[in-house]
Amino acid sequence: MGVVIELPGHAAIELTDLVLDFNGTLARDGALQPGVAKRVTRLAARLRVTVMTADTHGTARRELAGLPLTVELARNGEAKADLVRTLDPEHTAAIGNGRNDVAMVRLAALGIAVLGVEGAAGELLRVADVVTTDVNDALDLLADPLRLVATLRD
C-alpha cells in the first residue's frame, strides 16, 4: 500500500495518506465533479483518503457517501493543517484550491493546487509543489507518479 514518487536527485517520497478539500476542489457548487469518485476509489486502494471541508454548501457527506474515505469538517485552515500533522506530513499529499488549504499544502510532502472553475487562492499557488487546472488531473498524478517526474525534477 502507498504511492512512491521517485524524483532524480531527491529522496523518494513515500505517501500513505491523501488529504483533499471538497468545495472548489472535488466539487463544483457543492456537487462532486464527474470522474472524481472513480479516481478517489482507485487511489483509496493505495492511500488512506480524508476529505477536509468547511462544507460551504452542506453537501459533502451526501456527495461522498459510499466512497472509501473519511469526511472531516474543518472550520478553518489550521484545522486542516492539524490533520496533516496528525497523519505525518512526510507521508501525506494534499490537494486543495482555497486560502484555507494553504497550511495543509505547505506541510504536506506533496502539495497540489487546483486552479479550476471556482478559482484558486493566489497564496496557495505560491506554496504548492504542482498546480493543475482540473482535480482529475491532480488525482491522476498520484495514480501515475511518473507524470510528476517531468514537473518536479531539478
Image (tube, grey):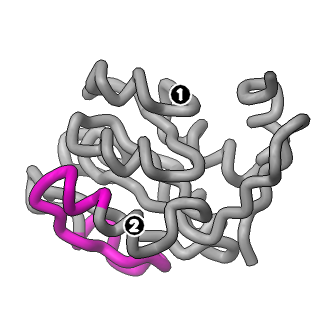
Residue 26, position in %: x, y? 37, 48
Question: What label does residue 132 carry, if any?
Answer: 1
**Residue pointed to by mark 2:** 85
Q: Is residue 125 above or below residue 42?
A: above
- Label 2 secondary element: helix
Please give the count of numbered marks on the rendered protein: 2
Corner quadrant of residue 61: bottom left
Q: Name which residue type carries label 2.
A: Arg
Residue 9, position in %: x, y? 88, 36
Residue 131, position in %: x, y? 52, 27
Corner quadrant of residue 138: top right
Q: Is residue 12 above or below residue 100?
A: below
Q: Which residues are magenta?
A: 61-81
Question: What label does residue 118 carry, if any?
Answer: none
- Depth check, mark 2 against mark 1: the one in front is 2
Residue ID at (33%, 52%): 21
Say if the magenta span includes residue 9: no
Q: Quadrant of the C terminus?
A: top right
* Viewer-proximal residue among 142 and 110: 110
- In the rendered view, does 99 fall on the left or right side of 139? left
Residue ID at (63%, 71%): 16
Corner quadrant of residue 141: top right
Residue ID at (67%, 51%): 142
Q: Residues within 10 Å of mark 2 (few under 14, many from 20)?
A: some
